[in-house]
Image (cartoon, rainbow, N blue to C red):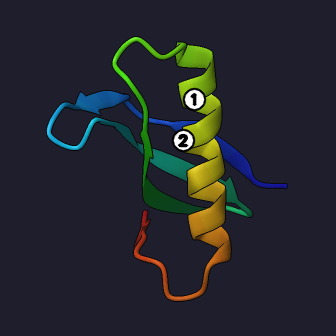
Amino acid sequence: MTTATLGKIRYNAGSAAYEALAEFRDSGATRRYPCSVEAPLNAPMTAIKEALLQDAEDRAATPGTLFSRV
């Protein structure tokens, strides 16, 4: 089973998007994916976290996507 966690969430005013690094742990391997979601600064944090995790899951499922291994 894979567990996903988000690192520190930051707001990038230049692109009007929230950004974070998502970490997936599975069978002793750790992969990190950058993720982002366009949203206004006053968007609900619960919705932002869900959208960031969805973006990270989509990236993890896409072959050839940039990620780092720890």
Label 2 environment density (alpha carbons within 10 Å; few <14, some 14–19, many ≥20)? many
The quadrant of the image that shows the C terminus is bottom left
Residue 18 circle label: none
Q: Amino acid at mark 2?
A: Leu
Answer few, some or many: residues within 10 Å of disc 1's Cα (few below 14, many 20 plus, some between 14 and 19).
some
User: Within the image, what quadrant is residue 18 found in?
Assistant: top left
In the foreground, 42 or 26:
42
Q: What x and y, as percent, mark residue 44?
A: 54, 13
Task: Classify residue 7 as left or right of residue 60.
Answer: left
30 left or right of 8 in image: right
Furthest residue toward right:
1
Residue that mark 1 sits on: 49
Q: Are marks 1 and 2 in contact (CB under 8 Å)?
A: yes
Q: Please, is residue 32 above or below residue 9 in the view?
A: below
Looking at the picture, which amino acid does disc 1 mark? Answer: Lys
Mark 2 — residue?
52
Q: CA distance from mark 1 to mark 2?
A: 5 Å
Q: Quadrant of the N terminus?
A: bottom right
Q: Where is residue 30 drawn, in percent x and y?
A: 55, 60
Please tell me which residue is depicted at 34% across the width and 18% down the height of the picture: 41
In terms of image quadrants, where is residue 39? Answer: top left
Q: Position of residue 5 (x, y in %)?
A: 58, 38
- SS class of the residue under badge 1? helix
Residue drawn at point x = 62 percent, y = 17 percent? 46
